[in-house]
Image: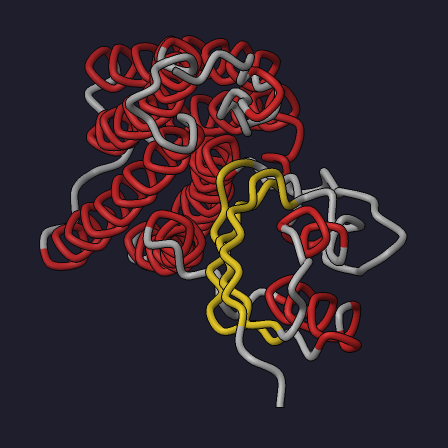
């Protein structure tokens, strides 16, 4: 029976970074958004304003989506030690971002439908009250955007050995919550412009027109988020520059033994963290997995590697 201690060859599969701050911010923004939603719905009912009621229910979809992001953080943290997750629970957060992007698309569709209904069947709008509440909603959204700190869009992973900072450290779940807040802020700005035009110049058609413009903007953001989260969920990472750099590092670093990479798989397991599995064919009779691993050791983002070595006869 093998009695050696295996702990030196074992490690935890917790590749996600510390997201406690992001979770707290997202949960706080969820409650603020929910409070603003109730205010708009109440004001719409009190002032008999369909515009405010519609915007309040529109904000409810954002509150649900941001709540989903907060839930994803909590679930990823709760199951972080669950060994059933082969490479940790980070993708729960990414899945939350993907679902949140679908909510954004749903919001865009509802905005178009509502705007077209307004174009065909205009309703009287209480402009003064609607503008006041829209401005208040905008201020709330700006506060929430500040709390979320830019959605992780500027958290760069600084390595001197390569220049891939643009996609390292991105928190896609936080970005999805941030996009909901920004989308709501953008629609608030467009609503204020439309309401001001209707109030001052009688351009009632401006309100639904701005609704359609806002829907196109929201749909565009949602599509970008769907593409990014979808790539991670489907492990479509083989066009990442680090893939070629691993291949070049192995083949150039072990050129003396004519070692070639026969098979290589790289996928993301955390914010700026990757796993790889590679198979090499070599003429060396002494090559070890550690020798291969040393050729790409400068890539600190490769947090887990599985190496298979095949030996062939020289000549």
Q: How many marks?
A: 0
- Say which of 8 and 102 sits in front: 8
- Say which of 126 and 193 sits in front: 193
Residue 267 drawn above or below residue 75: below
Q: Is residue 210 visible?
A: no
- Residue at the image point whose x is 42% and y is 33% from the top: 87
- Residue at the image point whose x is 44% and y is 18% from the top: 2
Residue 102 drawn above or below residue 245: above
The quadrant where residue 199 appears: top left
61 horizontally vs 200: left or right: left
Residue 225 position in % (x across, y down) = 42, 51
Residue 237 position in % (x across, y down) = 48, 60
- Most extreme residue toward the bottom is 315
Which quadrant, please, contains the C terminus?
bottom right
Residue 57 position in % (x across, y down) = 23, 26
- Residue at the image point whose x is 33% and y is 36% from the top: 95
- Most extreme residue toward the right is 160
The quadrant where residue 281 appears: bottom right
Residue 60 position in % (x across, y down) = 27, 23
- Residue at the image point whose x is 53% and y is 36% from the top: 270
- Most extreme residue toward the front is 1
- Say which of 46 and 93 sits in front: 93
Which quadrant, please, contains the N terminus?
top left
Q: Looking at the image, what colour scheme do you see?
A: secondary structure
30 horizontally vs 273: left or right: left
Q: Is residue 249 visible?
A: yes
């Amino acid at each position: 029976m093998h009695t050696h201690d295996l702990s030196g060859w074992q490690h935890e599969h917790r590749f996600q970074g510390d997201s406690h701050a992001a979770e707290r911010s997202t949960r706080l923004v969820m409650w603020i958004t929910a409070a603003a939603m109730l205010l708009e719905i109440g004001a719409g009912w009190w002032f008999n304003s369909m515009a405010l009621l519609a915007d309040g229910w529109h904000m409810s979809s954002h509150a649900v989506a941001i709540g989903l992001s907060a839930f994803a953080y909590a679930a990823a943290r709760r199951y972080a030690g669950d060994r059933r997750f082969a490479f940790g629970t980070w993708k729960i957060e990414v899945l939350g971002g993907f679902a949140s992007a679908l909510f954004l698309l749903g919001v865009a569709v509802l905005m178009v439908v509502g705007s077209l209904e307004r174009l065909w069947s205009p309703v009287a709008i209480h402009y003064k009250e609607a503008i006041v509440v829209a401005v208040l909603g905008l201020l709330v959204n700006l506060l929430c955007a500040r709390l979320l700190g830019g959605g992780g869009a500027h958290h760069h992973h600084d390595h001197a050995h390569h220049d891939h900072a643009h996609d390292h450290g991105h928190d896609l779940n936080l970005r999805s919550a941030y996009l909901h807040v920004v989308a709501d802020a953008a629609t608030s700005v467009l609503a204020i412009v439309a309401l001001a035009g209707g109030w001052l110049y009688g351009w009632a058609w401006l309100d639904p027109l701005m609704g359609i413009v806002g829907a196109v903007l929201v749909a565009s953001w949602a599509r970008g988020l769907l593409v990014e989260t979808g790539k991670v969920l489907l492990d479509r990472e083989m066009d990442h520059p680090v893939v070629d750099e691993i291949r070049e590092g192995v083949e150039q670093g072990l050129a003396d033994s004519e070692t070639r990479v026969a098979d290589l798989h790289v996928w993301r397991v955390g914010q700026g963290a990757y796993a790889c599995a590679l198979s090499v064919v070599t003429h060396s009779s002494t090559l070890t997995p550690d020798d291969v691993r040393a050729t790409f050791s400068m890539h600190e983002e490769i947090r887990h590697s599985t190496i298979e070595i095949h030996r062939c006869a020289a000549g």
